[in-house]
Image (tube, grey):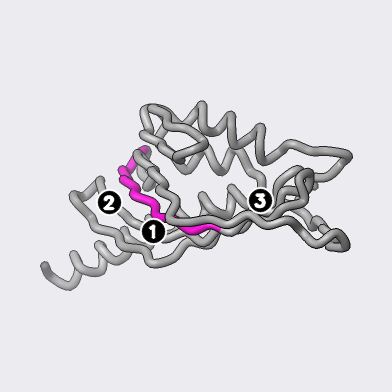
Amino acid sequence: MDLAQRIDALEQIEEIKKLKYRYWRACDAKDPVGFRNSFISQGASINYGGLGAFDDAGPMADIFTAVALRQVEGSYAVLDMHHGQHADIELTSETTALGRWTLKFRQIDTVRRTEKLMTGEYDDAYVIEDGIWKMSQCHFTETWSITTPLHPEAVIAEGTFGGKR
């Protein structure tokens, strides 16, 4: 592989990383459009374990919307924090790639007043659609989690999510 090919490969891998980061940012910002736009337009293979398995991103985007945007007494019912790391991305052709990521996840359930810590592994596949990288597969396997009650005096303060509340 010559220098130009190596640089192009690094640039493609960086674009895939940016895609995955936009996906997690959309999850945390309660952005259903950004979430849905992370996937190919039709036929994505999605498996989020307990949240379900789907042959298209549409049904999962509907679940995401219902969960992420649910409000109780003017506040969001869940607050999420996704931190992805340990990217392992392999270009398999000029328009396809595979990736593995480790997720560190934290969720506050404002209704049940619990905090969940979780970690797990993503197994992804990517394709170029309309000139940009999209996920064609996103499978998540939980490694472990713990859910604990919040202290009775804990104060949950919300900021803004993508400029909206």
Residue 128 badge: none
Position of residue 58 measured from the top left corner of the image (x, y, whole percent): 50, 28
Q: CA distance from mark 1 to mark 2?
A: 10 Å
Position of residue 137 measured from the top left corner of the image (x, y, whole percent): 35, 40
Q: Secondary structure at mark 3?
A: loop
Q: What span is in magenta?
A: 118-129
Position of residue 109 measured from the top left corner of the image (x, y, whole percent): 72, 48
Residue 101 badge: 1
Q: CA distance from mark 2 to mark 3?
A: 26 Å
Position of residue 163 measured from the top left corner of the image (x, y, whole percent): 75, 52
Looking at marks 2 and 3 on the same chain, the residue that comes earlier in the sequence is marked by 3
Q: Contact (CB < 8 A) between labels 2 and 3?
A: no
Kindly identify which residue carries mark 3: 29
For the point 17% across and 72% down, the residue is: 3
For the point 26% across and 50% down, the residue is: 97
Closer mark to the observer between disc 3 and disc 1: 1
Identify whether 124 is placed above or below 18.
above
Residue 86 position by quadrant: bottom left
